[in-house]
Image: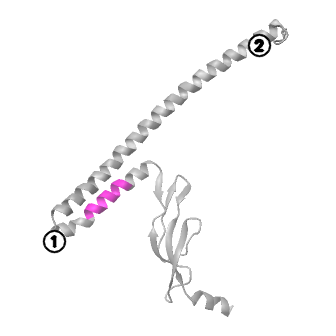
Amino acid sequence: MSDSFPNYLISLELRNLLVQKLSTLEKDNVSLQKSLKEQQTQTAAQTEDLFLELLEVADALEALLCYLENNTHQSPEFTACLPNSISAVNGKFLSILRKRQLLPIELQAGTEPDFNLCLVIDREERTDIPDQTITKIVRRGFYWGKKVLRPAEVITAKSDHGNEAKDNE
């Protein structure tokens, strides 16, 4: 049996050092496992909070849809209030996003696009404004912190107006 498992002799000093290092590794492992469990608990609580807030938005939309289904003949007063109701639900949803550092990218129609913040999805013939001017914001973009999570989708002008100026130079 001694042939298959050679015996190694180590000094007492080296043995003590190895025991100390092993003990330190075990303590670090326990500490990391505890930290991981705390992070998982915190993440689960944050996720639960997010879901509860999103359910409030879903409840508001469901109540609105239910009312529309059950009242096919809306009064003019209701029709006048509908945009405000939908706007309130949208505001609640945007506040949930804001709490999580998800902020809308602010672009203005009538300006040139910043291609770091937006994606041109279509062009439309226009002679009244310069080429490449944003004519419509189709879908709002969002930052997550400082990162562009989703670029805004825009339509820009396509005109010979800008090309004529280049040709005259």
Residue 65 picture location, percent across and down:
24, 60
- Residue at left 16%, top 61%? 70
Q: Residue 26, which numbered label?
A: none
Contact flag, marks 2 and 1 (Cβ < 8 Å) = no
Q: What amino acid type should be assigned to the residue bearing mark 1?
A: Pro
Q: Which of 136 and 111 is in front in this view?
A: 136
- Residue at left 67%, top 18%? 24
Q: Nearer the viewer, residue 110 or 136?
A: 136
Q: Nearer the viewer, residue 51 or 131?
A: 51
Q: Is residue 59 left or right of residue 44?
A: left
Q: Is residue 165 above or below residue 116?
A: below
Q: Quadrant of residue 35?
A: top right
Residue 128 picture location, percent across and down:
49, 88
Mark with earlier residue (2, 1): 2
Residue 154 in magenta stretch: no
- Residue at left 49%, top 68%? 107
Q: In which quarter of the image is residue 21?
A: top right
Please state, as top left, top right, bottom left or bottom right, where the N terminus lies in the image: top right
Q: Mark 2 points at which residue?
A: 17
Q: Is residue 89 left or right of residue 106?
A: left
Q: What amino acid type should be assigned to the residue bearing mark 2?
A: Leu
- Residue at left 50%, top 87%? 126
Q: Name the residue under label 1.
A: 76
Real-space Cα distance between discs 2 and 1? 84 Å
Residue 39 picture location, percent across and down:
51, 33
**Callout 1: SS:** helix
